[in-house]
Image: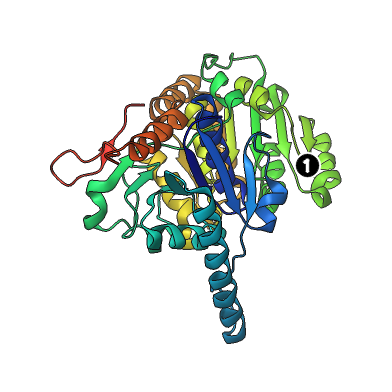
Amino acid sequence: MTGRTIVLATGGTGGHMFPAQALADELLFRDERPVLLTDDRGAERSAFDSRVEVRIVRAGTFTGQSALGKARGFVSIAAGCWEAHRLLKESAPAVVVGFGGYPSLPTMLSATYAGTRTMIHEQNAVLGRVNRLLAPRVDSIAVAYLSTQQLSPGTFSRVTVIGNPVRDAIAAVRDIPYTLPDDSGPFELLVFGGSQGAAIFSDVIPKALALLPKASLKRLRVTQQCRPEDLERVKHQYHAAGITADLSTFFSDLPARLAVAHAVIGRAGASTLSELTVAGRPGILVPYPHATDDHQTANAKALADEGAAWLIPEDRLSSRTLAETLEALLVNPAYLAHVAEKARNIGRPNAAQGLADVVCRLASPNGDPGHGIGNGAPHEEAA
């Protein structure tokens, strides 16, 4: 690699790692040199291309800590800033890109204080706490939603709406047309609740499906991700109801299952919604109510307001409510297709390329990321 060094600073969760990984792949394709700076957990979970150098910096958090815990968090962040300063001085990056999460904070603070060109990417419809802290300090801000909350008006001229990068296998699903369920044929229902499954889905969904008319039960083909402790119980419930179900704690072929799904039930994390919209599949979204700043509800609402998904708050999710929703969809497949098309229209399959475009413009000699349209409003990149 003979290109410019681009440092990617990110937390260790999938929601932060996935877009960073997608950007790294695109930068490698352009012969740039991405370098990942994260904490121990992020380094362990990293699935980046082997050509991406991974460096570790210490990090801490103030959130939900006692006074002693906050003090330890401050010390860890200060130590991480010193480590990041040394690494940035050594690598001399053209741009440093932050993806949120406390492990990104030391690197991003060090970069801004050093005068290095900086950018953040926000995956959710609410600016995260670390990105909220960094937004006034960075040169460019990429967001997934035009309606992103917690952005101050003073930052609008530096905002570009990019979307969230998705895996190539998910992007390929976009080329597979949504197929209307036949009136008497199988109805493929895909259920997943994030990386560990959602306990409430195991409690509510089997009971809800058992309430459907017998003709509908015979059509159902359920694929559901469950927690290990729920697998046997859920399997027994589906068997007792006469419902065909494939259950697992993890599906390595999730893109293929998404491709044939007639409907999806899931949480409303950034990665989930990006995959649904890029693939163009209709989803019933049940936001995780304890997500920071309730960002999953904001994510789901961004889709529901466009008619691209259905939103059911967890405190209103019951077997009866879900059964009624599903039965209405089973008898009106045209409505499913309409919502699938709405979702597809929102999807941004070229988000990784768009994000790389902004990074490379920022790394250019004049450092112009190319956003700002003269009226102080966020600029929206072409999907």
Horizontally, is 131 left or right of 60 in the view? left
Q: Residue at the bottom extreme? A: 67
Q: Residue at the left extreme? A: 375
Q: What residue is at 17 percent from the left and 38 percent from the top?
A: 373
Where's residue 129, x and y in %? 44, 62
Q: What residue is at 63 percent from the left and 51 percent from the top?
A: 55
For the residue pair 15 and 139, the one nearer the viewer reads as: 139
The answer to whether residue 365 shows anywhere in this view is: yes
Where's residue 155, x and y in %? 26, 54
Q: Mark 1 points at which residue?
A: 249
In which image quadrant can residue 25 be found?
top right
Q: In which quarter of the image is the N terminus?
A: top right
Where's residue 307, x and y in %? 38, 34
Horizontally, is 321 left or right of 356 in the view? right
Q: Vertical placement of 97 versus 186: above or below?
A: below
In which image quadrant can residue 188 be found?
top right
Q: How many marks?
A: 1
Badge 1: residue crowd in 10 Å (few <14, some 14–19, many ≥20): some
For the residue pair 217 and 181, the one nearer the viewer reads as: 181
Q: Vertical placement of 41 versus 255: above or below?
A: below
Where's residue 299, x and y in %? 44, 47
The answer to whether residue 282 shows anywhere in this view is: no
Q: Quadrant of the C terminus?
A: top left
For the residue pair 105 and 64, the one nearer the viewer reads as: 105
Horizontally, is 1 left or right of 134 in the view? right
Task: Give the amino acid at mark 1.
Answer: Thr
In this picture the colour scheme is: rainbow
Q: What residue is at 29 percent from the left and 35 percent from the top?
A: 380
Which SS class for mark 1? loop
